[in-house]
Image (cartoon, grey):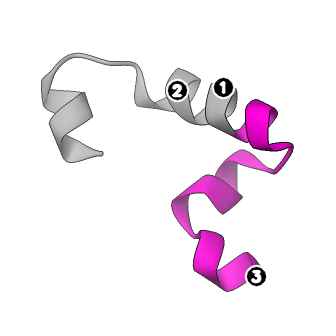
């Protein structure tokens, strides 16, 4: 995720999109292991 930040991506928006696609909470994207 740090590489993406350096590239200038909006990490929060990316996480929200990923969470929406996977139908999970944005916080779960960062720690999927804790939720499963």
Q: How many marks?
A: 3
SS class of the residue under badge 2?
Answer: helix
Residue occupying the point 79% across, 50% down = 25
Q: Look at mark 3 in the image and give the residue it sits on.
A: 36
15 in relation to 32, above or below: above
Which image quarter is the N terminus in? top left
Tell me: 7 left or right of 33: left
Q: Look at mark 2 in the image and give the residue it sits on.
A: 14
Spatial CA distance of label 3 from label 1 is 20 Å
SS class of the residue under badge 1?
Answer: helix
For the record, the magenta segment spans: 19-36
Q: Position of residue 30 (x, y in %)?
A: 53, 59
Queried whether the magenta region covers residue 4, the answer comes back as no
Spatial CA distance of label 2 from label 3 is 21 Å
3 in relation to 7, above or below: below
Residue occupying the point 68% across, 60% down = 28
| Disc 2 + disc 1, Cβ < 8 Å | yes
| Disc 2 + disc 3, Cβ < 8 Å | no
N-terminal label among 2 and 3: 2
Residue occupying the point 56% across, 22% down = 13
Residue closer to the observer: 23 or 30: 23
Which mark lies nearer to you, 2 or 3?
3
């Amino acid at each position: 995720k740090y590489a993406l930040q350096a590239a200038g991506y909006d990490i929060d928006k990316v996480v929200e999109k990923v969470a929406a696609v996977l139908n999970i909470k944005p916080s779960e994207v960062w720690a999927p292991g804790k939720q499963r």
